[in-house]
Image (tube, grey):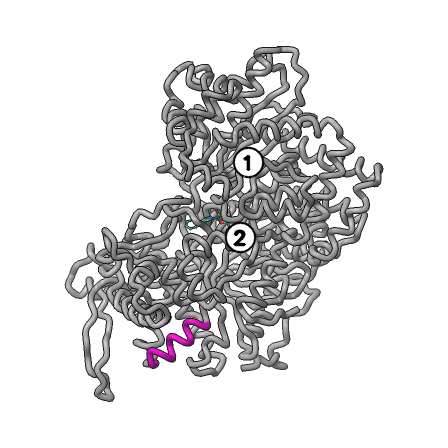
Amino acid sequence: MKLEAKEDFPPATENDARSGNSVAAIRKSILDHIHFSQARLPVMATCNDWYVALAYTVRDRMFGHWMNVVQAIADPQRKIVGYLSAEFLMGPHLGNALINLGIHDNTRAAVAQLGLNLDDLLAQEEEPGLGNGGLGRLAACYMDSLATLGVPALGYGIRYEFGIFSQEIRDGRQVEKTDKWLRLGNPWEIHRPELSCTVNFGGRTEWFHDERGRLRIRWIPNRVIKGVPYDTPIPAFRKDFIGILRLWKSEAVESFDFQAFNVGDYYKAVDEKVVSETVSKVLYPNDEPEIGKTLRLAQQYFFVSCALQDMIRVHLIRGKALDTFHESFAVQLNDTHPAIAVAELMRLLVDEHDMDWCEAWTITRNVFSYTNHTLLSEALEKWPLPFFGHLLPRHLEIIYEINHRFLEEVRRHAPGDDGLASRLSIIDEGGQKSIRMAHLASVAGHRINGVAELHTKLLSRTVLRDFHAIYPDRFVNVTNGVTPRRWMVLSNPKLAGLLESAIGDRWICRFEEEIEKIAPLADDPAFRNHWREVKRGNKADLAGLIHERTGNTVDPDTLFDVQVKRIHEYKRQHLNVLHIVTLYNRIRRNPNLDITPRTFIFGGKAAPGYAMAKLIIKLINDVGAVVNRDPDVAGRLKVVFFPNFNVKNGQMIYPAAELSEQISTAGKEASGTGNMKFSMNGALTIGTLDGANVEIREAVGPENFFLFGLTVDQVNDLWGRGYNPRRYYEENAQLREAVDLLYSGHFSPDHQARFVPLLDTLLNHDPYMLLADYQAYIDCQDQIAAAYRDQEHWTRISILNVARMGRFSSDRSIREYCKDIWRIRQGV
Ligand code: KOT
């Protein structure tokens, strides 16, 4: 279907007050919204009222672009990406939209004419924290790149009423606060009740004869809820295109209320409403173990069913029959959280649209592909069979049928190898029977990808080894990337300005080709001076913020050594702490020691149920409290924990960092994306050969990267030989001194034994091999301290880091997905 512009419906013009980009037009539009959208007198408008009026003003300027996307979605020639993700960690919209629409400066001027400051309005926005960390933020960067590359895309997810908790630090401990991000409304979204879907749960299945006398199966659910979509435009960078983020809210179905009313059960009806709304109530804050939670599975099925119903609707509007569904959509499963989509598409095609099983399976296989984001066994999703069958009885049958046919194929491939069949089976028959969601996704997906070269290699050698053996061609690597729009232009305007004065602005959307043009300037002393001024300015800004948020005074002339990411034992924030305690011991022994002054900055949330991660937060704060006030240290060491690390705070922290800590145990971090954000902002990396660190090091050059630690092979080898962490403690005086000081209660005088669980774990098991990597880490940090003293050299490396980050733009990642996975042509 081609949507023609009709004479009697002229398109909105470019220069009226609703879409014009001049200072006057923007100013007029803000005032119009204060009046017409909010019914406020300007003199009585609050800062939030002005923020909302500005948000509407900016949103208006995306509607023209939106219509272009509607055209593309209606065009049967164009394939659409359906990105299915339980998390989208978008970060604040306003600043990003101003940059991408190219109206930042005019808006600042327009706002100033109204007697306001744009920064105050930007600060008003509550960030939609609809994700835990890396996985959700990746989905957000990919939406930005899809739009910028002109690929029609719908991001499907859940409109959680409460996103990731906000973190406060009290007495050095994490305190979780619910995230009421919708409290004051959300001006960015468009409510689309007319596109609502219904989603069933529970009940049973039964055989029946259809009108043509064929014996078929139908699902008799015992619960139904409604999914209502809310659309948010994700603007492309300086192109008249957007991506659509379509998030579903769960509501009660009216007809169900009536049923209850009919029997006079008013309270049951109200109850039903409460239960239905619960489904999209809250984001699960865990970054690790799945604990068989009904609500979690209900959430996954809920948004996936809505998404597929929506895609089928779009496909049919294109005037096409369902047997070509795979020509309209490429659907990416962002890890296994949406993997139930495989069974749901089969159900929709076979049960609801009467398609033959084999034809439906061919389509399903063509549509889906699967991205794996972790090798940690505790994070691999499994659902116990009885529990799964209780919530989704029809899907259980479908999964059995998929598995049955799949295992027949396996047996043809390797006759008599029952071990192989049971290892590959979607159903784990050992112990408590369960469904392995990664297997479901791998059986169905025509492509399976890891998120960094090392990760993809390990994936095909470990977790999905048997799948790789039978289907090697399904496996591809797509190394993660991040958007230079948000993570450079928006968050680091000083650096962006300097880059623009040197090489123009083409690097912003042609990062791969253009950014390397600054490399020769690494040898230009004047440019290096400017570079240092930019970093110094960002450090001073962050120092101000740290003071405001924590009360700590930090010196912008010290080395800013930063580790911000989720708190997890495998990420080894406590290895960083061992370094701090080691330096502290050196100073205590020799108070006049000449060391490179450092500010250690930590940030990150711990899953609320992860006791060890929470103890690590307390450890950082307790060590900080003692070190920061020790007169012997005399400002040479400062330790701060920046509370509530999120996108907004990240935007302030990455640009100010000089040293990026990427110190996970080799083989544990699938990729990492913070590592890329730091490096793009001129921080040097201290890192292990893990995840994308390997590729970052190759790209920037080994001489410009501080490498330490065991490799994956060495880690495995050491486990094989029998790892005894206590031996490292006994044989290394410096390490022993650090560990003993922690045991002694020096940092926890109010509770001497506080850190015993953590220290005992290190000495007795040390599952992440901190003690094995300790000395290499300390030696590497000593080299860094020396290198930092040569500021000319340091700056040179910093410039080269940025110059060589071309590969790590999410635009490159999305181009690879388009070509190798989605088989899609790019738009603009
Ligand atoms: C969480 C639960 C189950 C499965 C996967 C996860 C997960 C993985 N959540 N975040 N990740 C991170 O994803 C990032 C984007 O690919 C990676 O850079 C990072 O290494 C993962 O830890």
Residue 91 locus on image (x, y percent): 54, 48
Q: Is residue 83 left or right of residue 407?
A: right
Q: Amino acid at mark 1?
A: Gly
Q: Nearer the viewer, residue 435 or 613?
A: 435
Please give the residue where the numbered disc 2 appears in the rendered image. Answer: 138
The CA distance from mark 2 to mark 1 is: 27 Å
- Is the shortest distance between ligand 1 and the CB of mark 2 under 8 Å? yes
Q: Which mark is residue 569?
A: none
Q: Residue furthest left?
A: 263
Indicate yes or no whether the magenta region holds residue 395: no
Q: Exactly how many numbered labels are in the figure?
A: 2
Q: Which quarter of the figure is the C terminus placed in?
A: bottom right
Q: Nearer the viewer, residue 697 or 78?
A: 697
Residue 64 locus on image (x, y percent): 62, 67
Q: Residue at x 81, y 44 (%)?
A: 521
Vertical placement of residue 383 versus 732, above or below: below
Q: Is residue 252 visible?
A: no
Crowd band around label 1 with a 10 angstrom C-alpha radius: few (<14), some (14–19), many (20+): many
Q: Is residue 785 left or right of residue 574?
A: right
Q: Residue at x 40, y 23 (%)?
A: 755
Residue 265 locus on image (x, y percent): 17, 59
Q: Which residues are magenta?
A: 355-366
Vertical placement of residue 40 versus 796, above or below: below
Q: Main secondary structure of the magenta part?
A: helix
- Is the shortest distance between ligand 1 and the CB of mark 1 under 8 Å? no
Q: Is residue 670 left or right of residue 799?
A: left
Q: Amino acid at mark 2?
A: Leu
Residue 433 locus on image (x, y percent): 24, 55
Disc 2 is placed on an element classified as helix
Please give the residue where the numbered disc 1 appears in the rendered image. Answer: 709
Q: Nearer the viewer, residue 773 or 813?
A: 773
